[in-house]
Image (tube, rainbow, N blue to C red):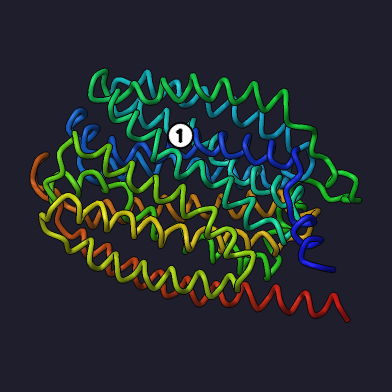
Amino acid sequence: MNTKDIVAENKFSSYQVVVIILLALTQFTVVLDFMVMSPLGDMLIKSMELTPSQFGFAVSAYAFSAGFSGLLTAGFADKFDRKKLLLFFYIGFIAGTLFCGLATNYFMLISARIITGLFGGVIGSISLAIVADLFPLEQRGRAMGFMQMGFGASQVLGIPISLYIANHWGWQSPFIMIVGLAAIIWLMTMIRLEPIAQHLELKNDKTAITHFWHTLKQKQYRTGFLMTALLSIGGFMMMPWGSAFAVNNLDVSYEQLPGLFMASGVAALIIMPLVGKLSDKIDKVKLFSIAAIAMMIIIIIYTNLKPVPFILIVGLNVLMMAAIMGRIVPAMALVSALPKMQDRGAFMSINSSLQQIAGGIAAGVGGLIVVQQTKTSPLQHYNTLGYLIVAIIIANIIQMYRVSNLIKARKHTDQL
């Protein structure tokens, strides 16, 4: 096979492009709903007079409910058309986000985050299962790279716009904006996405509970679950207090925050497709390891930072985003190769659930470590989080190698 044939074979079809766009837009709203909590964090803490631990619990509430929901639905994930599952959970996510926009006190906020997490937390795993079903492994890194562009777009467009309208109409207004956009995307998905039910043709007599247990007890699968859980812990432990640290420790103003998040988002938009292509061409573990080492260096510098010129803060955030993307894309592409087709939905649901639960624990632990004496005083012990995350990243590298070795061993066995 010559080079032209290989290029043609790996080129996305027009329908695959439509699928990527729909999933990227879906990811945009779901990620924005979660990510906007961090830049709105300082505003929320001061508006509702929250402590860092209370805000950490608000973040954890979403993560724990998302994880719980994923575990409940894992046994059913391979029993239904993936399109129907996506539409069902997405409409629930929209309702939960609307509730967030209507919240007027801490109890309502926590309740709304739990509802949103119950539905929104499953959407990512369904999307990954769809990608794994419709894209071969040779295309999967690029497909996931483009799909995850919703993450970058949420920072380039979503977060700056959200901060702008929050400054004018209150912190609730970004959630109302997300509801309107998500409703349009839901209709587009219902119209354009074709049924995805090939996995239903595979004979599977297991009940939902049996299927869940069968997936969970597979040793190879548990290796993948641990890897993604470690990947989640680092992000959740540091992210919730990003805006509070920038405002109170680095003297970044509310007016500068949109620019800070936009710069990181632009970097993510540019880097994600590049990392996706690289992960299809070079060893995913090597790419992950390089990004992880860079991440450790940047985290140690950033969490010990004092007030410096704004451009330096932006530069460090851009580098940190590049390192984050360099870990997420190859890790998710590699772990998607672990499950068999008939287990994919359950695997992705459990994987996403444990990732969310681990993140919720991390956010809760982070809230216990970080201290703020008053609403305007600097955060204390933020650098302690940095050192703890470095240790977690080292464990994550080791686990990534274990997953890679399992996949290589299985391929070798299949060829015999």
Q: Residue at x 23, y 39 (%)?
A: 257
User: Where is 384 relative to 238, above or below?
Assistant: below
Residue 350 x/y as whole percent: 62, 52
Q: Residue at x 39, y 60 (%)?
A: 234
Element at badge 1? helix
Q: Residue at x 58, y 47 (%)?
A: 146
User: Where is 279 relative to 54, above or below?
Assistant: below
Residue 39 x/y as whole percent: 29, 39
User: Where is 404 relative to 5, above or below?
Assistant: below
Residue 63 lies in quadrant? top left
Crowd class of label 1 (few under 14; some 14 to 19; many from 20; radius 10 Å): many
Report whether 285 appears left or right of 407.
left
| Kind of residue sitting beneath label 1 | Ile
Which of the two residues, 356 or 145, is positioned nearer the viewer here?
Answer: 145
Report whether 326 appears left or right of 283.
left
Q: Residue at x 37, y 18 (%)?
A: 102
Residue 156 lies in quadrant? top left
Q: In the picture, which quadrant includes the C terminus?
A: bottom right
**Residue annotated with mark 1:** 114
Which of the two residues, 69 or 257, is positioned nearer the viewer here?
Answer: 257
Report whether 194 appears left or right of 335.
right
Which of the two residues, 63 or 91, is positioned nearer the viewer here?
Answer: 91
Q: In the picture, which quadrant includes the N terminus?
A: bottom right
Which of the two residues, 6 or 68, is positioned nearer the viewer here?
Answer: 6
Count of marks overlaid on the render = 1
Residue 52 x/y as whole percent: 22, 45
